[in-house]
Structure formats: C-alpha cells, structure tokens
Amino acid sequence: MDIQLKRGLLDVCVLAAIKNEDSYGYQIIKEMKPYILLSESTLYTILKRLESANMLTVRSVEHDGRLRKYYHITDSGLKRIEEFKEDWKEIISIYDFITREDNNYE
C-alpha cells in the first residue's frame, strides 16, 4: 500500500479510536487491534502528528504513581473524520471503475 495513503488511513483510525472518549496509548492500540496491528512507536508518531495539526489535545493524569497521557479529539479531528467519510465514497467509486472489468469475468 502507498505509504502516504496508509499514513492518512492510520491517522483517521486513531482519531476514530478516541472519537467517543478520551484515551491513552495502550488503550488505543488495544481498541484498534481487531482491525489493525499498530506498534507503540508508530502510534506515538501519529499522536504527535495529530497533536501538531490541532486534531487532538493531550492531558497528563497520574495513574499508579506514573503520569499517563490522555488524548482528546478536537473539532478539527472530528471534521477530519467526516472529510474522510466523504473521501471514501470517491475512493469506492474509483475502485469500482478500476475493477469493473474484473467483475465481468466472475
């Protein structure tokens, strides 16, 4: 898969994982695991990128004597998810066009 496409997809997946409630790294990975395998290093790179783009905010909370970072989606992050849903409709149309001849052989 094209690296830029995959990056965009993973960004939206992370936003979707925290859409309904604030979450922390391990929980995000756990929630995504049935759909996508994501390493911690990849996740934290994505979280930093989304924070820099103002699509999420971060707050630290003490948990078992350690600080845990909780991520919260912003209005920009919610807007990005909605844009993705619209973009996906176009991607499906493109896929249908590319595979239209394949469907004639089945």
Image (cartoon, helix red, strand yellow):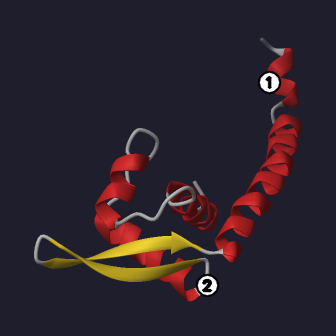
Sequence-earlier tag: 2 or 1:
2
Residue extending farthest top: 106
Label 2: few (<14), some or many (≥20) within 10 Å?
Answer: few
Residue extending farthest left: 65
| Quarter of the C terminus within the rendering | top right
Amino acid type at circle 1 is: Asp
Which residue, given by chain and number where applicable, does mark 2 sit on? 53
Disc 2 vs disc 1: Cβ atoms closer than 8 Å? no
Q: Residue at x 55, y 88 (%)?
A: 52
In the rendered image, residue 44, in percent from the top left (x then y), is placed at 37, 74
Which residue, given by chain and number where applicable, does mark 1 sit on? 102
Mark 2 vs mark 1: give the one in front: 2
The answer to which quarter of the image holds residue 101 is top right
In the rendered image, residue 66, in percent from the top left (x then y), is placed at 15, 78
| Viewer-nearest residue: 88 or 50 | 50
Q: How many marks?
A: 2
Q: Residue at x 81, y 14 (%)?
A: 105
